[in-house]
């Protein structure tokens, strides 16, 4: 549901990734060695890590850097900017399937780019979630999804096995449609088993089926003996408000002028967040609200009101969160200025009084 808009090129990534652009375009069986992170992995409690993650933002999914570092908008320095603004986690959105060859090998150039970004984020003290985000294909073609997802985690999990515990893995974003709850429950266990071969105690993020919606949490089946799991939830209610004017959601493409902020609106938000909290307590699983946001066709004041309400509701219930997204739509950082979209930033992270 996310689209890239044309923005000015940011400087810096080309320098950070110097030499990668000249790498061979055909994926090699040899993958680059894992980078040195300067700290070792130590297991950490899932609930404690979720609490420490606190406030975050989704980054990098639709940036040109994955195909051509010279055209990157996002630079390694943006992690410093994100940290200084008050965020403590980033969800790195990865669309890896286009970079897996017919033999199932990840393009080493792509993986080397990921290494640069992960290290830069960690160097700023951020927690990093590696989110495999090829949800559209996975909602249509189960067999191809399974093959590619297995190839991805079979390489990425061992590659990052020695990374500090501030690197988390998210198996797959928003399973839906053909990837039903029953199929997803089977797939997540298989993928988790692959991850656990090399990362037995790393915290892994897993959401329910049907777009990681709160309604399907009761259908989510997790291995009872695995305590190193954080459960993701996405929240875009009401869609008529958060997705008004969105070209990729036909029901709301021509629906504009929807407002938010009545007492009834707040009551529904709190009721639904209470449902998530009740499930979290009953199942002893911490919650990471790792997508929420209102598309930028909504009025700015209403967007800010909704964003603030959702963020505060999550915090009041002990959920870590990550806003969707830095750019290009639901926009939080305007690359054309460049600078923060201040009303949205202030809604997410209120300035000191």
Image: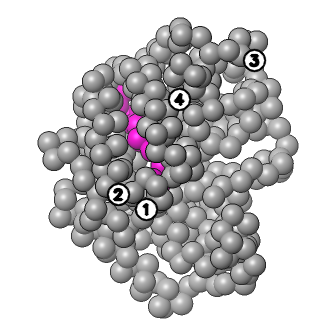
First in residue order: circle 1 vs circle 3: 3
The residue that disc 4 covers is: 118
**Closer to the N terminus: mark 4 or mark 1?**
4
Q: Nearer the viewer, mark 2 or mark 4?
A: 2
Total residue callouts: 4
- Spatial CA distance of label 2 from label 1 is 7 Å
- For disc 1, the marked residue is 210
Q: Is residue 323 left or right of residue 319?
A: right
In what element is the residue under mark 1?
helix
The segment highlighted magenta reads: 164-175
Is there a contact, CB below 8 Å, between mark 2 and mark 1? yes
**Mark nearer the N terminus (2 vs 4):** 4
- Which residue reaches farthest bottom? 263
What residue did someone put label 2 on? Answer: 181
Mark 2: secondary structure:
helix
Residue at the spot of label 3: 21
> How many angstroms separate mark 2 from mark 4 (CA)?
31 Å
Q: Residue at x 17, y 64 (%)?
A: 282
Please tell me which of labels 2 and 1 falls first in the chain: 2
Task: Answer with left or right where residue 292 lies relative to residue 267.
Answer: right
Residue 245, compared with residue 211, is above or below; it is below
Sequence-wise first label, 3 or 2: 3
Across and down, in percent, residue 29 comes to 54, 10
**Residue in front for this viewpoint, 168 or 176:** 176
């Amino acid at each position: 549901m996310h689209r890239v808009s044309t923005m000015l090129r940011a400087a810096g990534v080309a320098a950070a990734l110097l030499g990668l652009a000249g790498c061979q375009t055909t994926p090699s069986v040899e993958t680059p060695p894992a980078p040195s992170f300067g700290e070792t992995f130590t297991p950490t409690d899932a609930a404690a890590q979720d609490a420490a993650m606190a406030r975050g933002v989704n980054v990098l999914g639709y940036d040109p850097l994955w195909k051509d570092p010279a055209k990157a908008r996002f630079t390694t320095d943006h992690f410093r900017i994100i940290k200084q603004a008050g965020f403590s986690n980033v969800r790195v959105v990865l669309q890896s399937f286009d970079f897996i060859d017919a033999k199932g090998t990840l393009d080493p150039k792509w993986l080397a780019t990921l290494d640069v970004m992960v290290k830069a984020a960690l160097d700023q003290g951020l927690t990093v979630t590696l989110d495999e985000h090829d949800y559209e294909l996975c909602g249509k073609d189960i067999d191809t999804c399974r093959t590619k997802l297995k190839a991805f985690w079979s390489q990425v999990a061992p590659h990052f096995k020695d990374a500090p515990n501030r690197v988390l893995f998210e198996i797959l974003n928003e399973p839906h449609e053909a990837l039903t709850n029953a199929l997803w429950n089977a797939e997540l266990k298989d993928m988790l088993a692959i991850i656990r071969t090399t990362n037995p105690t790393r915290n892994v993020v897993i959401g329910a089926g049907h777009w990681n919606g709160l309604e399907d949490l009761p259908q989510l089946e997790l291995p009872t003996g695995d305590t190193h799991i954080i459960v993701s939830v996405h929240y875009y209610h009401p869609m008529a408000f958060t997705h008004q004017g969105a070209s990729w959601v036909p029901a709301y493409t021509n629906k504009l002028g929807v407002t938010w902020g009545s007492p009834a609106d707040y009551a529904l938000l709190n009721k639904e967040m209470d449902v998530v909290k009740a499930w979290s307590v009953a199942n002893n699983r911490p919650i990471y609200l790792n997508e929420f946001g209102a598309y930028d066709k909504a009025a700015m004041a209403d967007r800010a009101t909704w964003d603030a309400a959702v963020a505060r509701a999550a915090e009041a219930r002990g959920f870590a969160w990550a806003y969707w997204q830095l750019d290009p739509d639901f926009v939080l950082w305007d690359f054309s200025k460049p600078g923060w979209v201040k009303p949205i930033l202030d809604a997410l992270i209120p300035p000191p009084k």
